[in-house]
Image (cartoon, rainbow, N blue to C red):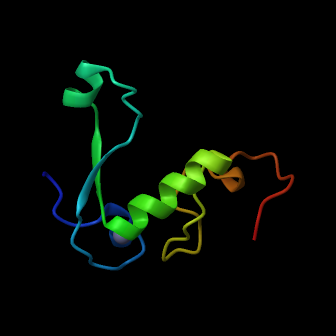
Amino acid sequence: MNEPLCRMCLQAGVVTAATVADHIEPHKGDRQKFLHGALMSLCDPHHRSTKQQIEKKGFYCDIGIDGYPLDSAHPVYQGGGGNVEK
Ligand SMILES: [Zn+2]
């Protein structure tokens, strides 16, 4: 594993050993994507909670140390205003 620490914990200023190498892009059984797709290291709680959020909403809601969501897909970055969750 290239990154021994959970990437999402790091973004939030916390150092946690990663236990999961997660495919950023779902590989859906594609062997090339599975072997060569980009990975990010996550701890187990992050892996479970963020994947559930992404599947339900299309983004995850974790907030970084700068007070902004960590996920660039979060509605706050989409510019349109609208119904941004608190
Ligand atoms: Zn984590």
| Quadrant assignment for the C terminus | bottom right
Q: Is residue 58 visible?
A: yes
Quarter of the view holding residue 48: bottom left
Q: Is residue 76 above or below residue 43?
A: above
User: Where residue 26 appears, x then y in whole percent?
Assistant: 41, 34
> Residue shown at 27%/78% (left/top)?
15
Q: Report x, y in % for residue 22.
A: 31, 48
Residue that appears at 60% across and 50% down: 59
Q: Where on the image, by quarter, is ligand 1? A: bottom left
Residue found farthest to the right: 82
Vertical side of 26 occupied by 62: above or below: below
Specify whether residue 73 is in view.
no
Residue drawn at the location 59% of the way across and 67% of the way down: 68
Estimate the x, y position of residue 41 in percent, counting from the top left.
27, 56
* 68 sits left or right of 44 in the view: right
Q: Is residue 19 left or right of residue 46?
A: left
Q: Quadrant of residue 12?
A: bottom left
Total marks drawn?
Answer: 0
